[in-house]
Image: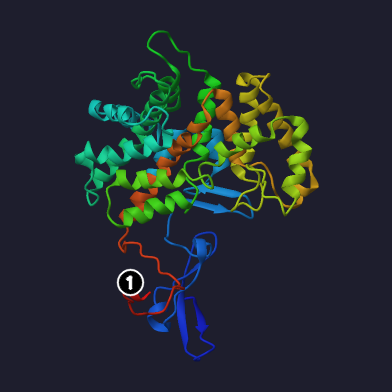
């Protein structure tokens, strides 16, 4: 047989099954177990899906051992150095880097969709003044389908494209409006003359009564962070978007589900947790005590922002963002803020301490992005919102890829049941 297969034998019954192996362009191949339960009578058990490919995708590839990340085949290092966020967005949605005219056209499309329906804007007033901005974002993004009926037919390729453009364009506007609501300031309309990240900064920090000057370092730093956060294979939020999309839900509902998953502190909330950890440490003089706790297996304290579940080498995104972090701190960081001194000292230790080096506990992208956000003036509760803005591109691209598959079917994971066996109901008076 020319097709590559693997043979599995049931040691109890002797029954065998040959399963085909699906080829990848790079990275591990996958055993197709579609017939396994039907022919062998067993489920496969894989908590967290750590060894299971839930889909096939041509979008993003990462190799944790090598510390390698590719968007559509392009190394993240090259895109971070030469590209822009919207250029990367075009690449992810359409498979190729745009030409000059294509990029200009794409940029104009995103700009035209950045405003919110005036009725939608009033929705923000229904949230409590100190609601977490992620809670507001989940609600507002989920409600977009109530305002944009002309782009919810998922079987129409034009509708899918328009919905994707709207989500990418409106996310900064929604994020800024969520922030303005939380501090009691009026919402600021988008400015079509500004860049994607410049517009976000203007909507967040400008006020009607005085001019606001966008800092080019902050603008450049945000664009870089957004590129690094565009997509990251089948992580929890991306898998959530795909699973919701498999039910044929509208794209706005699917992206809202992704935002909900991203909100978790084990996922998108990690950069927020980094700042909370630094606040807990408090002072450079306390570092030895907390390092001892981190090395103590019996202590629950962990250094957040170091190491990565997937990367068993240096996170390639961290290498890129580290230089930008130091540039931002030099330009915008408050030299009297002990947080930055504390963070830089922790970084120095992690890069030189044998305990960290042996375990490959290097500073990751969350460690540096949190520091950049803080230096720019973005409050801690907005960190995950920033992540959601960037990751929307990946979610939309993944959703578009999933919904156009010929063999697309609703997700339905199985389980290993460990509850009681069948038993009879007992009358309440006899229990």
- Residue that sits furthest to the front in the current view: 429
Of residue 377 and residue 126, the one placed in the foreground of this image is 126
Q: Is residue 396 above or below residue 286?
A: below
Residue 391 percent coordinates (x, y): 44, 41
Give the image quarter of residue 255: top left
Question: Pointer 1: what residue?
Answer: 428
Q: Is residue 282 above or below residue 15?
A: above
Q: Residue at image x 41%, y 45%?
A: 260
Crowd around label 1: few <14 · some 14–19 · many ≥20 (10 Å): few
Q: Residue at image x 48%, y 50%?
A: 60
Residue 183 percent coordinates (x, y): 43, 22
Q: Is residue 114 above or below residue 165?
A: above
Residue 309 percent coordinates (x, y): 60, 52
Tell me the quarter of the image containing the C terminus: bottom left
Of residue 169 and residue 21, the one placed in the foreground of this image is 169
Secondary structure beneath disc 1? helix
Residue 209 percent coordinates (x, y): 39, 8
- Residue that sits furthest to the top in the current view: 210
Give the image quarter of residue 246: bottom left
Left or right: where 248 falls relative to 381 = left
Of residue 373 and residue 82, the one placed in the foreground of this image is 373
Asked whether the viewer can see residue 206, the reply is yes
């Amino acid at each position: 047989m020319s097709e590559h297969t693997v043979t599995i034998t049931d040691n109890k019954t002797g029954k065998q099954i040959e399963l085909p192996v699906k080829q990848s362009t790079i990275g591990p191949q996958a055993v197709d177990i579609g017939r396994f339960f039907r022919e062998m009578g067993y489920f496969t058990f894989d908590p967290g899906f750590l060894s299971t490919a839930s889909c096939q995708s041509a979008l993003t590839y990462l190799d944790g051992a090598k510390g390698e990340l590719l968007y559509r085949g392009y190394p993240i290092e090259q895109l971070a150095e030469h590209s822009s966020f919207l250029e990367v967005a075009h690449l992810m949605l359409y498979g190729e880097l745009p030409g000059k005219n294509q990029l200009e056209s794409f940029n104009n499309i995103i700009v035209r969709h950045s405003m919110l329906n005036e009725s939608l804007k009033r929705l923000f007033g229904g949230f409590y003044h100190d609601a977490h901005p992620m809670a507001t974002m989940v609600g507002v993004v989920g409600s977009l389908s109530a305002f944009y009926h002309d782009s919810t037919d998922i079987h129409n390729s034009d509708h899918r494209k328009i919905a994707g453009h709207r989500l990418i364009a409106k996310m900064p506007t929604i994020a800024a409006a969520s922030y303005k609501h939380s501090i009691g300031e009026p919402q600021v309309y988008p400015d079509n003359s500004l860049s994607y990240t410049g517009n976000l900064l203007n909507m967040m920090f400008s006020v009607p009564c005085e001019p606001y000057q966008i800092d080019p370092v902050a603008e450049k730093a945000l664009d870089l962070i957004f590129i690094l956060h565009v997509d990251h294979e089948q992580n929890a939020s991306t898998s959530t978007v795909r699973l919701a999309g498999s039910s044929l839900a509208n794209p706005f509902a699917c992206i809202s589900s992704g935002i909900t998953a991203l909100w978790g502190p084990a996922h998108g909330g990690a950069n927020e947790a980094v700042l909370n950890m630094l606040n807990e440490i408090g002072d450079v003089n306390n570092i030895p005590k907390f390092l001892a706790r981190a090395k103590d297996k019996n202590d629950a304290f962990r250094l957040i922002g170091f190491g990565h579940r997937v990367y068993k080498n240096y996170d390639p995104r961290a290498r890129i963002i580290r230089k930008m972090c130091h540039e931002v701190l030099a330009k915008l960081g408050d030299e009297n803020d002990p947080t930055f001194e504390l963070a830089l000292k922790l970084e120095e230790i992690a890069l030189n301490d044998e305990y960290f080096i042996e375990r490959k506990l290097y500073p990751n992208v969350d460690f540096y992005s949190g520091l950049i956000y803080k230096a720019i003036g973005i409050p801690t509760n907005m960190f995950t919102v920033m992540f959601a803005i960037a990751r929307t591109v990946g979610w939309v691209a993944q959703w578009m890829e999933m919904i156009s598959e010929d063999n697309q079917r609703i997700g339905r994971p199985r389980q290993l049941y460990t509850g009681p066996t069948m038993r009879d109901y007992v009358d309440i008076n006899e229990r």
